Amino acid sequence: MKYFSLIWGNLKRRKLRTILTLLSILVAFLLFAFLCAMKEAFTGGVSIAGADRLMVRHKVSIIQTLPVSYANRIAALTGVSGVTHQTWFGGIYQDPKKNFFATMPVEPESFAKMYTEIVVPPDVMQTWLKTRNGAIVGKALMERMSRDYGWKVGSRIPITSPIWGEPANQPAWEFEIVGVYDVNKKGADNTSFYFRYDYFDEAREKGKGQVGWYSVRVENPENAATIAKRIDEEFANSPYETKAETEAAAAQGFAQQVGDIGTIMVAVLSAVFFTILLVAGNTMSQAVRERTEELGVLKAMGFTNELVLILVMVESCVLAALGGFTGLGLGWAIISAKNPVPDLLPNFFLPEKYVVMGAAIVLALGIVAGAAPAIQAMRLRIAEALRRNG
């Protein structure tokens, strides 16, 4: 620390150049934070998917429906310990541009047993079972809709569906909010709207007796692939053939439909960090060249080659750390403050693993950018340094 004033003084020598380099590094790590949050938003379902859960959908696509009678046949298979189902409803509240959120009819009890990461208070569950058109709302969605539209427990909410139309003899689907659910696992979805399947099936005018997809819990996760194959064989050559796969594989497949987010992120960040590496490396090289005579004086005063090497390396790391950590911190603060696209990407947050990865990249940037100038400074001979500007 006794040499920190010397390092700090060198950074302040060319203030404009140092500030521009810091801003470049800051923007790069701000972009890193947002891209990591985007990747997590698209692929988060893969990381939180239950290892003991399968998703069973129509063999052609998830748009096609399956008979509700499949539930009993799947539950009867050896190795299956639970079955529930969901159907995509596509609910819209007033404004289709702002208030299109995940809305699904479910069977409350089997749904709660299957998705243990979704926490429904016992009193809310009891009220839900007694209220035929009752619905539970995710905590994050409820907070937004309460702020913007005054939603509260007990409110009666009219919702339209572009898929299922209006229920018989009603202009819109009307639900009564019976409670709010939360999640006990970070990254799990708390922005959805769930209502009862029996109410949905009775009121809809088409597709009665059909469901969107099944969620199946297996007794032993190691047998998941075997049971998935057994389910597909059970319904092979039927009018509604199935495709069963692990929940993680299904989530991965959904994310891949958007694009290979991981590859895109790596390509963009590689280009950005390579550019920043050149910028930071050029800054340090110029700084060392401008101080050639001073470095010669320091060596003449007794500074060893190793000490000069360390001083330049530390200077480079401080430059990278000031810009990098500020960018990471600013990105984390902005992402944590507000989700800019809650309807499209409900799980928009920056996981701790990417913060740690970003910190490691900051240090790596400082070391790599400062390596060449530091070695150059270490090898500098006193006579040559004093003569160069003389």
Image (cartoon, helix red, strand yellow):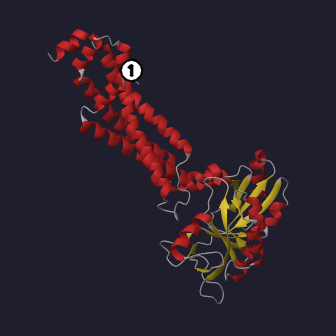
- Which residue occupies 35% across, 38% down? 276
382 with respect to 30 (left or right): left
Residue 41 figure quarter: bottom right
Looking at the image, residue 203 sits to the left or right of residue 341; the answer is right
Residue to which mark 1 is pinned: 310
- Report x, y in % for residue 128: 74, 73
Image quarter (top left, top right, bottom left or bottom right) of the C terminus: top left
Q: Quadrant of the N terminus?
A: top left
Residue 386 x %, y %:
20, 13
Label 1 sits on what residue type? Ile
Between residue 73 and residue 12, name the one nearer to us: 12
Q: Position of residue 382 (x, y in %)?
A: 25, 10
Write the residue at 30% across / 18% down: 377
Is residue 237 in view from this perspective? Answer: no
Give the residue displayed 58% in from the left and 79% down from the top: 160
Foreground: 70 or 364? Answer: 364
x 73%, y 54%: residue: 53
Quarter of image, res 364 = top left
Q: Nearer the viewer, residue 34 or 269?
A: 34
